[in-house]
Image (cartoon, rainbow, N blue to C red):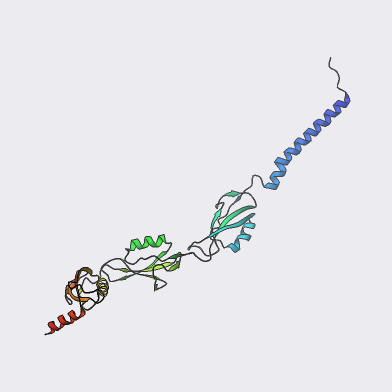
Amino acid sequence: MLKKIPRDWLAVLKHLVIALTAGGLITLGFFYVYLPLITNHGESITVPDLQGMHVDKLQDFLVARDLRYEVVDSVYSADLPPLTVTRQFPKPGSKVKQNRKIFISLNSVNPPSTRMPDLVDKTLRNAELILKSYELKRGQLTYKPDPFRNVLEQLYQGEPIEPGTRVPKGATIDLVIGDGHGIRFFEMPDLRGLPLSEANVVLKGNNLEPGLVFNEDSVSTDVAVVIRQRPAAGLTVKVGRIVDLWLGDPAELALLDSLQNE
């Protein structure tokens, strides 16, 4: 036969069961009632889109939505005003908990600068690609008579700009382009009496190509001038015509002119 359990032990077991039951209820209440209440368990906040918002408005806007923010860096975008949000993390539409910190990047007040590239004599397509690589914008196009459709001038704020000049990134560069319909036939200029360097400048300015250069008397180029040219001055020539030059002593040119005048 089973021995009877003493009443003292029954009381102990009764209190133990009560204590274990109470502990279990407290544990369940802590994890499934108390913690969800203080951590908003099961609740989330949708991250708003902050791009383009000025930093002065961020604090009130996010606090009203139980969120915070922190500026982590600054970048530059010509498409947004200064001190506005350019990027954010988490991204708009993400689900986060209350009081989550949103990390943002702000648009710089002053854009970084870059060097102006050399676009002269480039095709329009090539010039546009170069501008894009330098983070510059192509502005207004102006056409001038020229047999070639290349860039003739580059302008910033209405003034010519030299290659290498520092300009803000995102700056607009206007271009003067040849229309491809420039004067094709014109009167050959007179190059006689000019040093070779100046004669070549005149040739380039008239879209003529330097040809052969003769210096039969081996006159020093420091004093030599053009004494004869082919085609001769006054003849009708075409754009791109090759021009041959003869160099000589200025005194020789004076002699030739006097013989022609007799």
In the image, residue 46 sits, relative to residue 256, either above or below, namely above
Q: Is residue 187 left or right of residue 163?
A: left
Please name whichever residue, 41 or 230, is drawn nearer the observer in this view of the structure.
230
Image location (x, y in percent) of residue 53: 56, 61
Residue projecting furthest to the top: 1
Please name whichever residue, 193 or 123, is drawn nearer the observer in this view of the structure.
193
Image location (x, y in percent) of residue 223: 24, 77
| Residue 175 showing in the rendered view | yes
Residue projecting furthest to the bottom: 262
| Residue 189 showing in the rendered view | no
Q: Which image quarter holds the N terminus?
A: top right
Q: Is residue 175 left or right of residue 27?
A: left
Residue projecting furthest to the left: 262
Please name whichever residue, 152 or 92, is drawn nearer the observer in this view of the structure.
152
Image location (x, y in percent) of residue 127: 35, 63
Please name whichever residue, 104 or 26, is drawn nearer the observer in this view of the structure.
104
In the image, residue 217 sits, relative to residue 124, either above or below, namely below
Q: Residue at x 61, y 57 (%)?
A: 70
Q: Which image quarter holds the C terminus?
A: bottom left
Q: Residue at x 57, y 49 (%)?
A: 94
**Within the image, what quadrant is residue 208 found in?**
bottom left
Q: Is residue 232 left or right of residue 132?
A: left
Q: How many marks?
A: 0
Q: Residue at x 63, y 60 (%)?
A: 59
Image location (x, y in percent) of residue 235: 16, 75
